[in-house]
Amino acid sequence: MRFAKRAARGAAALLLWTVVALCLAAVTVPRFLDRIYYRGPVSGHFDGERFFNPDGEDTFAPPAGRPRSNFLLRQLRSDPDKPGWPQHVAVRLDNPPARVEGQAMRATWIGHATMLVQTEGLNILTDPVWSDRTGPFGFGPARVAEPGVRVEDLPKIDLILVSHNHYDHLDLATLGKLWARDWPVIVTSLGNDAILRSAGIEAHGLDWGGSLALRPGVTVAVTRNHHWGSRWFADRNRALWSSFVVRLPHGNFFFAGDTGLGDGKWPEEAAALGPIRLAAIPIGAFRFEPGQMASGSHIGPRDALRVWSGLGRPFALPIHWGTFRLSWEGYRTPPDMLQAMLRCAGSDTARFSAVAIGQPVMVPPLGPAPPAPDMAAVEACERAGRFAGMR
């Protein structure tokens, strides 16, 4: 029995150090692992080699502000102070209709940043990930909740939005299956189309401000957010990251992708393209140290309220939580904190409320925007320790 326990501990230690060695190798052998996905003119967010956030670069340091090697070790090893996460979450699977016609709009959060939106006879899918793990060579965080719709139950997909090239957003295995089955229009930001094309998948790679007409009355616009990209560590920011606005006859759909707050002006830029009826806004993977409320790369519930307000307070569904463990906070912390902050801000919690994976939602039609959340009240609640028990 003791021998078996020692062997298990030895195997776990060997696996840990193997992963650490691979990560360090990725940093120390950049010529081998670097990739050039895009060549083009210098712009306000491209220096001729790599993209950058024009509103200030705060995504390079590890989220906890410690050396990268320490951050990787802390993520890999067991931390007794970390809030617990379930190993498995039961999901009630949705079976979507083939189409939703006219101005009706149906949305299903499938998990993480994957959402199915059906309206105007159009089926839209965001950052589709059906793989069990997100990372290179089969490494990476494991899924705790299965996708809310089985791939075989998906209707024919017309449009796929791919926000950037991180493995939990650009999943070549899933995209390959959907491309072979449906031949959808795939829209992404500059450089990510080269990654897809290398796998035999065609895509439209557009710059911020670019757009693609899908059909009369429906246009996809690529819009700014605040993040970074990499698939091999050394290829950092060789491809662009983005959010999207799908312009529709009865109100637009906004997909934030994966983002930090940055200057906080980019939501208003998206709202300037027309009234937003539905927004998919990330709320998770924001805490890498106890008490942390955001990182340069990810917004938490507090900054998600700022994004929601900048978009015009549309009907919104929180994403990017409860599927893969990417950070320190507890499983239910993001949605519970969001609701507490909305109440503190005096906002209608029904306008921006978490739903279960696989639960379909009928999106209400456009209407008057509710008042902006009182962010000063939220900060006062935070100083008073109202959210301190939410780990």
Image (cartoon, grey):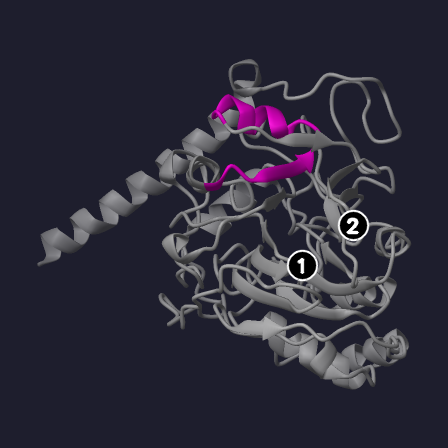
Whole-percent x, y for residue 188 in the image = 66, 37
The residue under the point 62% across, 78% down is 336
**Are the residues at dot 2 and dot 1 in contact (C-beta closer than 8 Å)?**
yes
**Residue 385 visible in the shown view:** no
Q: Is residue 124 left or right of residue 154?
A: right
Question: Quadrant where the C terminus lies?
Answer: bottom right
Whole-percent x, y for residue 343 in the image = 76, 85
Specify start and end residues of the magenta stretch as a single range. 182-200
**Residue 146 visible in the shown view:** yes
> Does dot 2 land on a helix, a strand or a loop?
loop
> Does dot 1 land on a helix, a strand or a loop?
loop
Q: Which residue is mark 1?
A: 120
Q: Is residue 57 left or right of residue 255?
A: right
Please tell me in which quadrant of the rendered image residue 67 appears.
top right
Q: On screen, 226 above or below 145? A: above
Q: Is residue 334 left or right of residue 218?
A: left
Q: Is residue 155 magenta?
A: no
Mark 1 crowd level (few <14, some 14–19, many ≥20, 10 Å Cα): some
Q: Which residue is outermost to the left?
A: 1
Q: Which is more toward the observer, 44 or 26? A: 44
Q: Which is more toward the observer, 204 or 379? A: 204
Please tell me in which quadrant of the rendered image residue 248 appears.
bottom right
Check disc 1 and give the amino acid type: Glu
Mark 2 crowd level (few <14, some 14–19, many ≥20, 10 Å Cα): few
Q: Which residue is mark 2?
A: 217
The residue under the point 49% across, 66% down is 82
